[in-house]
Image: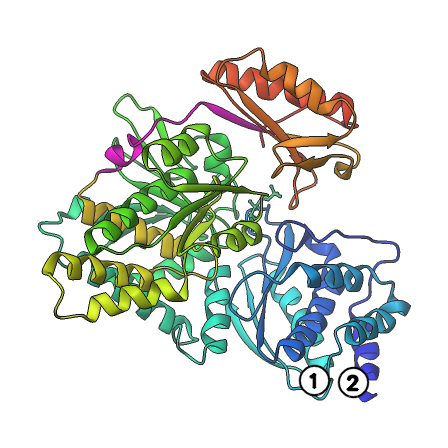
Amino acid sequence: MAQFEEVSQKSAIHPKPVGLVLQYGTAGFRTNSKQLDHVMFRMGLLATLRSKKTKATIGVMVTASHNPEEDNGVKLVDPMGEMVTPAWEVYATQLANAEQEELLTALKDVIEREAISMAQEASVFVGKDTRPSSDSLSQAVLDGVHALGGHSKDYGLVTTPQLHYMVCCQNTQGRYGEATVKGYYRKLSQAFIQLTKNVPNRTDDQKALLVDGANGIGALKVCEMETYLKNELQLSLFNDGSSGKLNHLCGADYVKVQQRAPKGVEMTAGERCCSYDGDADRIVYYYSGSAGRFHLLDGDKIATLISTYLKELLTQAGLDLQIAVVQTAYANGSSTQYLEDTMKVIVRCTKTGVKHLHHAAQEFDIGVYFEANGHGTVLFSKAAEKKIQKLAQDSNTNAERRRAALLLQNTVNLINQTVGDAISDMLLIEAVLAIRGMTVQQWDAIYTDLPNRQLKVKVADRRVIDTTDAERRTVSPAGLQEAIDSLVKKYRQARSFVRPSGTEDVVRVYAEADTQESADALAHEVSLAVYRLAGGVGEESKSL
Ligand code: G16
């Protein structure tokens, strides 16, 4: 077939280094950008096959998100804007790792196993972040799409959640929104203005927010959006990419892991600040207390704020919809306790990776999911959306119920339900704080985090660590879980777990306890156990 000849010829321009094997990680392939050209070409091929199979548009985002600038990676987006289905992750791995002369066989194998009609048209949307390597790597994706005769739309520089949004808009024939960046700005800003317009006496101070753009794509995009917000939000942007390096000493991951303010953000006591990550799918908030103490409001605090707000509106609207919060093992113990015991909402724990949280959240009328690192969103079932809409349009209902239903309706419109979205989450948080008349300090005071610490350990092969129970316990290497258990017993209110990262070549260690000293000591001791029992290399442990 001519298509296969074309693939053969074009793949020679994107050759695979012999013997290189890459794993499909937490959010796709991710490694040094120099190793990724062939992977990108092949993901272009795979996205085209996935499009033929689903008869829908598929997305490919070139980004390594929170990783350092020299890395890159790829995220695949399924028809409704969600991460690609796990069965196809297996194909992605097979294609990425097939030696040059085996590529066609691997490709034909996918076609056969999925019974794909090659006559079917295909459409792929492509986006990229601001890394220097993203230009040529996204071109490699496009080459892959075209080699199999697929149609492509290159959105160029967009945030990851913007690309997810475009795919969903396209496949819902515009019902979710218009598949353009302007359409995205218009939908979100209109919802934000609707939500905040009736809030009395919002002062300039209340409208002010400091934003750390991580020197990445989020900085560019939030600037573009600002005019649409009509001064209802007054942003001061730092780390806008004009001088600093992507994610270096800034961005959501740095702030969360280091528990300190990013470089370059000039904040005064009590000012609300937030940080995006490198592709703007995560956000964390923070402020400096009166004694100069740094206060972090991470994904857990965001989930609590949003679920409290939604629960209150549901009660006011008299709507009987089940609300649940989905977290991972990284969720601070205090947040889980508050959600279960005080708020009385259902809490679920899944493995790390938004695909797992997203899936679990789909089981409820309203599923709020957030990883502690700030990656998350809210999902509304179709039935829940219909009930909200019906009530919002019902002129016979009483004013209070109707007001609550209208707020819920605009909240649905403000949320990017396809994936975590720093810009959409930021607008939602700002709207909730305004509507509830809350300061960042009041939000922070909802519950007090248990002191915690995250470390990274380098091991020869992180796959030696195998976990169970949503990554809260290890099953291998032998003796590691026992070692963790006995270390945890030494401290009060303590918990610790380890897991291999799916985005970096490290093992992650998490510990929490009643004091910061104890959390630090526990994390350190657990790191040493990992180093000893899981084949540590180089420095024993480090926090970045
Ligand atoms: C990705 C995933 C997140 C995950 C993070 C860290 O985020 O989308 O779900 O929490 O990696 O994963 P790991 O601990 O396995 O390295 P991002 O923002 O880097 O794409």
Q: Is residue 15 left or right of residue 378?
A: right
Q: Is residue 491 above or below residue 178?
A: above
Res. 388 mark:
none
Q: Tell me the residue at 18%/70% (across/down).
A: 394
User: Would you say 241 lies left or right of 266 here?
Assistant: right
Which is nearer the eye, 113 or 354?
113
Describe the element under mark 2 as helix, strand or loop: helix
Instruction: Tell me, yes or no, if residue 228 can be seen here.
Output: no
Tell me the amino acid under the disc marked 1: Gly
User: Which residue is painted at 11% across and 61% down in the image?
Assistant: 398
Residue 440 among magenta residues:
yes
Determine crowd level at label 1: few under 14, some 14-19, many 20+ residues with C-alpha closer than 10 A: many
Q: How many marks?
A: 2
Q: Position of residue 298 (x, y in %)?
A: 41, 38
Residue labelled with disc 2: 3
Q: Quadrant of residue 532?
A: top right
What segment is highlighted magenta in the picture? Answer: 439-455
Residue 237, compared with residue 407, is above or below; it is above
Residue 115: image x %, image y %?
Answer: 76, 78
Task: Give 359 or 450, whichever is nearer the viewer.
Answer: 359
Q: Are marks 2 and 1 in contact (CB under 8 Å)?
A: yes
Q: Which image quadrant is residue 175 in?
A: bottom left
Q: Which residue is mark 1?
A: 149
Rendered view: 268 above or below 396: above
Tell me, yes or no, whether the highlighted magenta stretch contains residue 422: no
